[in-house]
Image (cartoon, grey):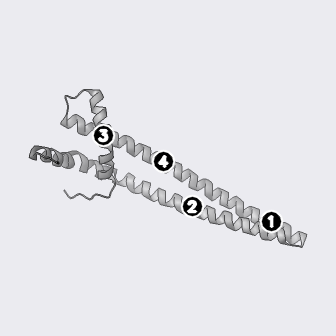
Amino acid sequence: MLEMKISGLDDSIQVLKKILLPWVAAQEPEREKRIATERTAQRERLEADLMAQEAKEKREAAEREADSLRKSVLIARADESKARALVYGAQAEKLRAEVEQMQKQQRLEMIKLGLEIVKTYAPNVPEEEKLQYVMRLLPDLEVLVSGKVKFRE
């Protein structure tokens, strides 16, 4: 059975208004940058995969060529395409690593946010317990700051 006291609801609203909404607004540019970087990395990974497949097909076609001079030229072009695909793949991997770093930074910022909330509403709790509360609070904070929940002030 769910039981809610009005004072708990009021505290929750205060947390949203005073702490969570300003934090979400401050984090929005970084969130948008992370999403854009993720999309770019995905596009470049797909492009690299397509380029690698095309290079493989070019190489296979070149191997079937009877004329040795033409075969050499086609193999060189296929190898050049493969090299471009590898460059795109490396760029995509670099962007993926940047996104991962951004996600780690956001996780750290959410831990700080959780600590701020716990310290504000339970200042007398021992530090070890505060960290336990923060860890329990993180999944809910992730949902609230994910962008899937929209708030109006």
Which numbered disc, 3 or 4, marks the residue that appears first in the sequence? 4
Residue 146 falls in image quadrant: bottom left
Which numbered disc, 2 or 1, marks the residue that appears first in the sequence? 2
Circle 2: element type = helix
Q: Which residue is mark 2?
A: 44
The three-letter amino acid code for the residue at tag 4 is Glu
Circle 4: element type = helix
The three-letter amino acid code for the residue at tag 1 is Ile
Q: Separation of disc 4 and disc 1 at Cα? A: 37 Å
Q: Separation of disc 3 and disc 2 at Cα? A: 37 Å
Q: Separation of disc 2 and disc 1 at Cα? A: 24 Å
Quarter of the C terminus within the rendering: bottom left
Q: Nearer the viewer, mark 3 or mark 2?
A: 3
Q: Which residue is mark 4?
A: 100
Q: Which residue is mark 1?
A: 75
Question: What percent of the width, then of the height, locates residue 34?
Answer: 43, 54
Which numbered disc, 4 or 2, marks the residue that appears first in the sequence? 2
Residue at screen point 69% across, 68% down: 54
